[in-house]
Image (cartoon, grey):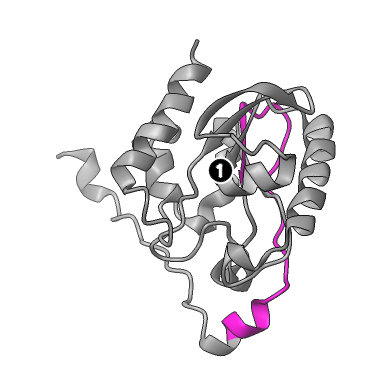
Amino acid sequence: MDPRSHRLPRRRHQVARPSPADLAAAAGRSIPDVIGPGLSVLFCGINPGLWSAATGHNFARPGNRFWPALYRSGFTPRQLRPDEQDDLLRYGLGITNLVARASARADELSPEELEAGGRVLVRKVRRVRPSCVAVLGVGAYRSAFGHRGAAVGPRDERLGGARVWVLPNPSGLNAHYTLDRLVAAFGELRSALDR
């Protein structure tokens, strides 16, 4: 008899969908970083969305393409769910945000918040010492670090000693990037890590 026939099917864990009241109450909250020693890449989002703040999981809103892009570009062996974010640590990956305050849209953040968040990120990177920091959002990177001409891809400067890579914002609101283009951008970073 095939021993696999006795395996129970893997249960699909579903995080409860936040109610409109839950989402409204999440405005201004923060969520913990997913950080540990020995990170090859620290992914840095702009700030948590309301869905993420309501659930406590990064990139949790349905339609956010972070988790599919991470998997399809080869960073993880399967597509993780937002509630499995701590599993990233075993792959040498982490998550933080430029600004801790949750909002409905990233464009609700002030330039001053992004600049202050950039300074906090530099201190965090110096403490945690990842090999690379991947900032998810070229506009946020430009605002936080004053590099007006920055584009998606590797940067010459270092951040707290770490290599810097700018990736597109994976939010479903970023219509400029399809999932395939996001995967390609994430894949370029993945390939560069192997060099």
Q: Looking at this rendering, what residue extends furthest in the top direction?
A: 195
Residue depicted at x 63% and y 49%? 140
* Residue under the image location 51 percent in, 85 percent down: 19
Residue 163 x/y as whole percent: 66, 23
Residue 138 versus residue 72: which sits nearer the camera? 138
Residue highlighted by disc 1: 138
Query: Is residue 78 in view from this perspective?
Result: no
Q: Is residue 141 left or right of residue 127?
A: left
Q: Residue at x 72, y 46 (%)?
A: 144
**Up-down relation of residue 65 to residue 152 (above or below):** below
- In the image, the segment drawn in magenta is 22-44
The N terminus lies in quadrant: top left
Secondary structure found at label 1: helix
Q: Main SS of the magenta segment?
A: loop
Indicate the position of residue 55 as horizontal and vertical percent values: 58, 70
Residue 37 among those drawn in magenta = yes
Position in image of residue 121 (x %, y %)? 77, 42
Q: Is residue 96 above or below residue 14?
A: above
